[in-house]
Image (tube, rainbow, N blue to C red):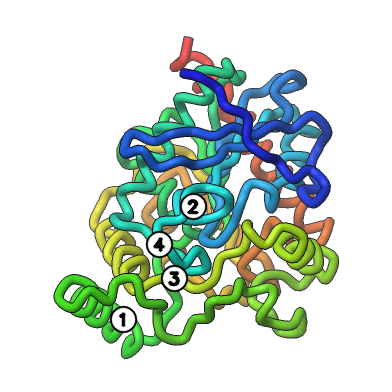
Amino acid sequence: MTLTPAPLHADVAFGPDGGSAYWLTCSDGVKIRAGVWGAEAASKGTVLLFPGRTEFVEKYGHAAGHFQARGYATVAVDWRGQGLADRLLADRALGHVGLFKDYQKDIEALLALVEELKLPKPLSLFAHSMGGCIGLRALVEGLPVTSAAFTGPMWGISLTPHTKKAAAWIGSTLAHNFGFGSTIAPGTLPTTYVLSNPFEDNMLTRDREMFDRMKLQVETYPDLALGGPSLSWLNEALRECRNLRAHPTPNVPSLTYLGTNERIVDAEFIRDRVSRWPNGELVIVEGGEHEIAMEGDAIQRMVFDGCDALYSAHRETQTAQTA
């Protein structure tokens, strides 16, 4: 594997010093980007960080700092169709994917980078929102981690029953029969959320500083920004969430954080999944919005301390399995 350096906008990442980024080419030729922090100082292993829809490596610089302080390296990914990865439509503002399972090709490339860089083992997972959906699929298919933490995982999308039924019909019928799959989904905007909504009553975080950081990142580097999803993306996402609900829970210890003010993903499906996860725990964050790991300092410390406790509790098991 030839390592090709990629840009890392450290000035807006708010991450630890010494980060680096690489271009990765997936098995289908799509180019994605990965960011790495803390490899030299890591004593407890490496966290695979799976971001949500619209997100990018720099958004998780602060998370990498938390993990580094607790003894972990972090490797984060720009999924296909977002961040600096290849955009899949001529309109780069529109979030799109051909098939949801294509994200697993991104994970394959990311794991190859982990091996090439000889990042410390064992591996643990931290996944947010859409990354939680992609991560659950990866766990079902044998992702080589034995503990996983989720924040606001997209195991269902918060839509009214009428809207959900309409979205599924519109997505499948118009996309496949009339070629409208690359049309923006109804009710969404081509402008990224933090630039089209004020801080007041936003659905991401109650912390003004973190919200302003998100704005600064996409204002400073507009190529990182992503607007609403395509009809095909929405249809694929609804289908994947439905398919995953039919799968048994993976035998991987887990920790899931859910805010009481969650309005983006469907909390009912999160509660249901964790209730059927024998070695899983659900932590309810009072007043928390969707971006639990981007709330205020006290909540951030709770989240990352909880992740550390989970990962550390299973570190010996992981080490034995990878020896």
For image coordinates 44% across by 46% down, the residue present is 135
Q: Earlier in the sequence, mark 2 or mark 1?
A: 2
Report, in whole angstroms, how far the alpha carbon at label 3 lies from the one at label 4. Answer: 11 Å
Mark 1–mark 4 Cα distance, whole angstroms, equals: 20 Å
The percent coordinates of residue 35 (x first, y second) are 63, 37
Q: Where does residue 312 sit, x and y in percent of width and height?
A: 64, 29
Going by the numbered disc 2, the residue's amino acid type is Gly
Q: Give the amino acid type for the residue marked by disc 1 in the picture.
A: Ala
Q: Which residue is mark 2?
A: 131
Quickly name the residue at label 4.
Answer: 89
Q: Which mark is residue 229?
A: 3
User: Element under label 4?
Assistant: loop
Closest to the camera, between mark 2 and mark 3, is 3
Q: CA distance from mark 1 to mark 3?
A: 12 Å
Mark nearest the camera among 1 and 3 is 3
Depicted 130 relative to depicted 67: above or below: below
